[in-house]
Image (cartoon, helix red, strand yellow):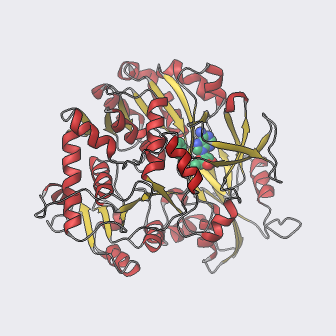
Amino acid sequence: MTLPFTPWPDEMARHYRQQGYWIDAPLTRGVAYQAHERPDAIALICGERQLSYAELDRRAACLAANLTARGLGKGDTALVQLPNVAEFYLVFLALLKAGIAPVNALFSHRQLELSAYARQVQPRLVVAARQHELFANDDFLSELHRLSPHLSATLLLGASDRETSLEHWLEAPSETGWQESHTAPDEVAFFQLSGGSTGTPKLIPRTHNDYDYSVRASADICGLSTETRFLCALPAGHNFPMSSPGALGVFHAGGCVVMAPNPEPLGCFELIERHAVDMVALVPPAVALWLQAAPMHAKALRSLRLLQVGGASFAEATARRVPEVLGCRLQQVFGMAEGLVNYTRLDDDDDLVFTTQGRPISPADEVRVVDEQGVEVDDGETGMLAVRGPYTFRGYYNSPEHNAQVFDADGFYYSGDLVQRMPGGYLRVVGRIKDQINRGGEKIAAEEIENLLLRHSDITHAALVAMQDPLMGEKSCAFLVGSAELRPPALRQYLRAQGVAEYKLPDRFRFLDALPVTAIGKIDKQQLRKQLASTTTSPSH
Ligand code: OOB
């Protein structure tokens, strides 16, 4: 009845409880508390709809009751894919209340990603939107049934029939008496998505205790209150807008979340002005677009107090422009779906805010910056980031081989980031050893795309590497060895046809006679990156 995951050692769990980090309450606690104390306060604004805390809690309970009546509950999982709409939180809260652990896929994900998640968690429930190309008809649902034989219920936002209509399930009262039945606070509440560096996307089990602590502590660090009005413009299921402090932090503090469909500046500026938004979380390319557009819209941004930026490297020169151009304070956030989140603090000196990615949330976060031998390097020196703590996971879901590679014997997780620790524990992210491209905050596992390319009968070798890009920070370039007939448009089409998310398609292709190799015969990606850096224009696309 419970989902498998790697727990924290007893001694650590005891310590985290003693210190008050783990409070043995469910993640739904924040909303339930507000619904009781301040039922009429507005929790959520989405388009013309406004939901009070009482309504948010009631409708989530209604859906939870209906799911329980259908025989779903503890030990079950759900595959969820919703855009940035109110239903995202209603469904998330409902699933937690019913003890069903969701995987929140990104709306940009397609067959390949969703199938990989379905294979791993074997969902009994799918919640999706008719407006997504995959769910416009029932073909892909049939495929999901095949992959996940226990799948027993499908709810679709925008469905015309009552049986599958998510909207209907959120309103229809259940006939049976119902009691909230969340999983135990030290068990899996839901799965976060890993940015990944391997062939298949990995899942991160998060418990109520660990996630709720990160939410409460983040809300505190960011000074959230009942007055907070947070614009959720990044994909709602991503760790950053969800818990750093994100929507869950806002619910904890009793503030209001305003949904934006995406971070596009003009749409967001309108929402900021209309709803007196005071806080937003963005990735660096979105900040660049906001900085461009802001001078024409200074009036609209008057209420903005705090801009959080994270997910990818943010150039110091751009950081310095934020307060002046957007008229608000900047906070750098260096986090990961696996756990550890660092923030610059609201009362930090400007220099710290502009030049570092912050320091860990918790005094109990154990951060080590180590060399290749695992020896800690001096402050200011570059090393690999290793971490364990009260909200950093202890293992990917059902992935013993990969876990053996990224955890050491003491349970420290190696994130694959290269960092420098500064005085006071502040971190600077200076690079990465994981084989991943960070395309403006969206993560691409090189191996996943290389494997897809290698399925093509005309390709014999493939290597995906990052190339610098002025707006996105990084874009991806595929180096290929194969037939002279290969053309970029056809290759993109080939990848699309395999059902991979659009952001993972290589931005450029380069064709070589052979890939450079290292002394031991591995593809020399360093060499390929150098090649890219030394050529400003490319003969191919
Ligand atoms: C956030 O989470 P993920 O899981 O999408 O990606 C984590 C990775 C980190 O390991 C690091 O490589 C990179 O994204 N990253 C940054 C960064 N923040 C994340 N690299 C440079 N500077 C930063 N500020 O991206 C995430 C999760 C919670 C809060 C914020 C971001």
**How far across and down, in percent of the image, does residue 33 sit?**
28, 39
Residue 106 vertical position relative to residue 335 in the rendered view, above or below: below
Any part of residue 260 in sight: yes
Q: Which residue sits at x=47%, y=55%?
A: 206
Any part of residue 52 in sight: no
Q: Tell whether 519 sits left or right of 70.
A: right
**How far across and down, in percent of the image, does residue 226 sit?**
32, 27
| Residue nearest the viewer, comparing 325 with 304 | 304
| Residue nearest the viewer, comparing 400 with 472 | 400
Residue 424 vertical position relative to residue 469 in the rendered view, above or below: above
Dividing the image into 4 quarters, which one contains the N terminus? bottom left
Q: Quadrant of residue 62?
A: bottom left
| Residue nearest the viewer, comparing 426 with 196 | 426
**How far across and down, in percent of the image, does residue 194 sit?**
54, 57
Q: Tell whether 341 sits left or right of 271.
A: right
Q: Which residue sits at x=47%, y=22%?
A: 326
- Seen as rendered, the residue at the extreme right is 519
Residue 255 vertical position relative to residue 18 in the rendered view, above or below: above
Write down which quadrant ligand 1 falls in: top right
Q: Tell whether 109 sits left or right of 515.
A: left
Dividing the image into 4 quarters, which one contains the C terminus? bottom right
Q: Give the mark count.
A: 0
**How far across and down, in percent of the image, does residue 12 sit?**
58, 50
Q: Quadrant of residue 398?
A: bottom right
